[in-house]
Image: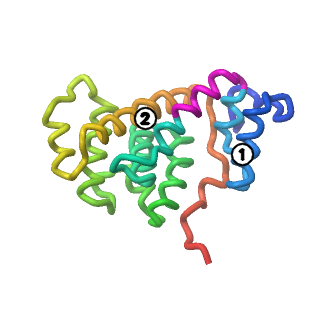
Amino acid sequence: MTTTRYPFPNLNTLPEDIKSRILETQEKAGFIPNVFLMLARRPAEWRAFFAYHDALMLREDGNLTKGDREMIVTATSGVNQCLYCVVAHGAILRIYEKKPLVADQVAINYRKADISPRQRAMLDFAMKVCTASHEMNDDDFAALAQHGLDDEDAWDIAAITAFFGMSNRVANTMHIMPNPEFYLMGRMPKK
């Protein structure tokens, strides 16, 4: 099975800012995530994608943790049947939450997952954004508020869901496969 529909560009031919970020990620993770290389085929899109990704996923304020953000990605990517995002973001979710089973649970059926009622309400909102955003109403926001999540948190949940909905569709269409390294990350406690 091929890794992608399109060949990865040569790392040494990429613009310096993109090459630098890719090498920084490789240094930190120990490998280069396939999505970094695939999107680098189009430098302007790569920059736009990662600028918005970072604005959503690395945001310091608000009530959503990094684990919450990865949980949203993993659960909605499961509904969108995006193998790359379920595996890659599921690995990050396992690490942030320090729960080796949580990613598999939320990707398949978050309603049966070992998560908090607050996280379940967050995912209820995300799933409605993912599958029926045209039906969103004040009751959806009220359900979040019962768990201490405000309108800004709702914005974050919706934006993350929408951004990764786009990402899921690109990854599926371009046949971006997960790196093998993602499958084991966060499954066994570090010694």
Asked whether residue 47 is drawn in magenta, I would say yes
Q: Is residue 67 left or right of residue 53?
A: left
Residue 18: percent from left, percent from top: 73, 33
Which amino acid type is marked by label 1?
Answer: Ile
Gap in Å between the C-alphas at discs 2 and 1? Answer: 24 Å
Q: Secondary structure at mark 1?
A: loop
Which amino acid type is marked by label 2?
Answer: Asn
Q: What is the residue that sits farthest to the front in this orientation?
A: 61
Q: Secondary structure at mark 2?
A: loop
Q: What is the residue that sits farthest to the right in this orientation?
A: 12
Please provide the residue range marked out in magenta.
Answer: 41-52
> With respect to residue 152, does 190 lie above or below?
below
Q: Quadrant of residue 183?
A: bottom right
Label 2, on which residue? 80
Dot 2 or dot 1: first in sequence order is 1
How crowded is the residue under tag 1: few (<14 C-alpha within 10 Å), some, or many (20+)? Answer: some
